[in-house]
Image (cartoon, helix red, strand yellow):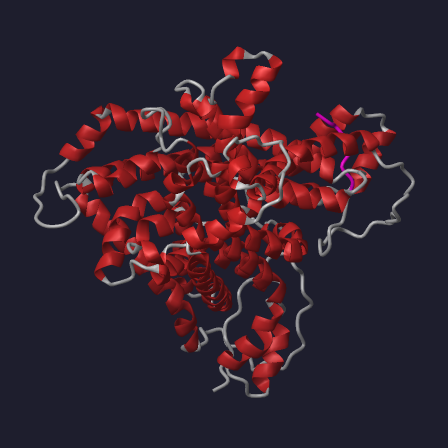
Amino acid sequence: MSQTTSTAPRRGAAEPTSPAPKRASTPARRRTDPIYYFFLFPALALFTLAVTLPAIVGFGYSFTNSIGFGDWEFIGLRNYIAVFRDQGILGAYGFTLGFSLVTVIIVNLIAFALALGLTSRIRFQAALRTIFVLPMVISGIIIAFVFKFLFANTLPAVAQALGIDALSSSILANESLAWVGIVIVTAWSTIPSTMLIYIAGLVTVPSDLYEAAAIDGASPVKKLWHVTLPLVSGYVVINTILGFKNYLNAYDIVVGLTDGGPGTATRTVAMSIFKGFEGGDYGYQMANAAVFFVISIVIAVVQLRLTRGKATFGA
Amino acid sequence: MSTTTPHLAPSPATDAPARPRRRSRIGRERPQWGATVILLVCSLAVLIPLLVTITMSLKSDAQAVEGEAFALPDPFSLTGFVQAWELTNFPRSLAMSAFVTVIAVTGEIIVSSLAAYAIIRNWDRRLFRWSFFYLLAAMFIPFPVVALPQVQLTGIVGLDNPLGVALLHIVFALAFNTMLFTAFLRSIPLSLEESMRVDGATTWQVFWRLIFPMLGPMAATVGIFAFLGSWNDFMMPSLITSDPTLQTLPVLQNMFQSQFNNSYNIAFASYLMAMAPAIIVYLFTQRWVISGLTQGAVK
């Protein structure tokens, strides 16, 4: 059963046309080997059963007063109206969006600077790369517990020794400062992966461009602005989109550091949705989840629009 | 900010364009000591929390309670490890984490590569093309959005356990992995498998004997990221697994917070044991971790 199969149009990777023996090329459609359906099936089935189906079921429940089990009634849009009036949920959106924005900016600036450093002519390059990638391999919740200790015990002790009264107690216990701790730890944890993507971008910049710029007498700042940045702008877009996607779902690190506190000062949207298990307001939190989904999509689309599709994986 | 001139620093296996530049340590330009020093100082920000974790875990009960991060252990004591081992039932939770991770890694590599191969070879068929975009759509679905109904459904079908967690890990990584594999498969010439087919090989044989071995480097990348994602995940197991005795290591760290209390040596020993396997795997496979992204992901 040696059926020849149709080929994918390959982009890039110009490959010499194969002189392999082919049967007379038929203009008509070739038949597809049925085993390909079998190859595709597990992925489609898993995705449909584990994501699509729950999404549809959950969306349906968002119009009911279900508590997660037992009887329920259809209540129309009442959940959605309530979500938009719920100070607790609005607060969670405010915190999550603000936190995401600040973290994306800080992480990208530091990661880009580190990537520049690590791709330049430094000594101990391999060792330094190994060290800077380390945070990526440690579980977020454990990182959070380690830093919680440092914020609670070590930082105040250091601050007292230096005579800084403002930091003499844990910043995590301070409603207006706790978010700073969360940004620091999230940055510590996610800078490595962002940095790796920038390194991937920087090594694609041909070195003769820099040499040409150097011959023209461009200063390092000018080189960065006119040579490097335009060529890696696509990677900035990728990192921003992936970053927002990650930070909007912030959960592990926040649970470990503050568990949403003090009060509800650092409660994220994910945490407020998960309260649907305990609070018996399953239908209500599904409405919240639907709103969250729309906002996530809008943020992604807006970023893609603003950057006019510069983020092309592999093009 | 160090505005240094980036040079092509080839990490292993990057397809950097060939350059007529010598790669010797001492090239035409001197090493940039300024940037080196700045980076060494910055690396302390990474190393200090890890060193504190190690020193705290080696303290005696009496010394650990003081919570002095920079005081060295005196006397050295392994009691934290012994107590953490028993308290968190470490062998069992290690086995749970390993179980979830092994299934997730194997599943992610096999399911995604099979799907990617089918899609690439049938790109002209609507079903396969649409399937690709359908799978990619998963990238935009945040887990919290579908978490509640997933918990409900996994409970109904009896998957509210580590197996269910592993399956969800496979599903949520599908989009990214399939994208990586398809990008990689585009660069494999068709001529190779055509000659195999002329000799009478079936698609099944072509995939397992020719394509899958060729996917090796990409499978290594996918596998490493699958391992890290699965091993370190807290959100899914904490929500999906209903039986606390079946919990993975990261979730247990959270469950025992109240019992660790001020016994910092026990707490940090426990954290260290939970993160050690990932760090060891990383140190052995860092070549792929660091070059993995640079290879196929964003070629």
Q: Is residue A99 above or below residue B240?
A: above
- Judged left or right of residue A83, residue B53 is right
Residue drawn at point x = 39 percent, y = 44 percent: B256
Q: Is residue A106 magenta?
A: no
Image position of A160 (left or right of A13):
left
Q: Which percent across, then down, holds residue B129?
A: 43, 60
Nearer to me, B207 or A107: A107
Q: Residue at x 56, y 32 (%)?
A: A107
Residue A192, position in %: x, y?
60, 41
Residue B101 in the image: above or below residue A269: below
Judged by its main secondary structure, the magenta piece is loop
Residue at 70% across, 44% down: A129
- Closest to the observer: A194 or B295? A194
Which of the 4 image quarters holds residue B220? bottom right
Answer yes or no: is residue B3 visible.
Answer: yes
Q: Is residue A307 visible?
A: no
In terms of image quadrants, where is residue B127?
A: bottom left
Residue A124 placement (x, y as % from top left): 78, 42
How far across and how far down the image is residue A237, in percent?
A: 55, 37
Q: Is residue B238 left or right of residue B233?
A: left
Residue B221 vertical placement versus A40 (above, below): above
Q: Which residues are magenta?
A: B1-7
Q: Is residue A40 above or below residue A191?
A: below
Q: Is residue B6 magenta?
A: yes
Q: How many marks?
A: 0
Residue nearer the viewer, B238 or A67: B238
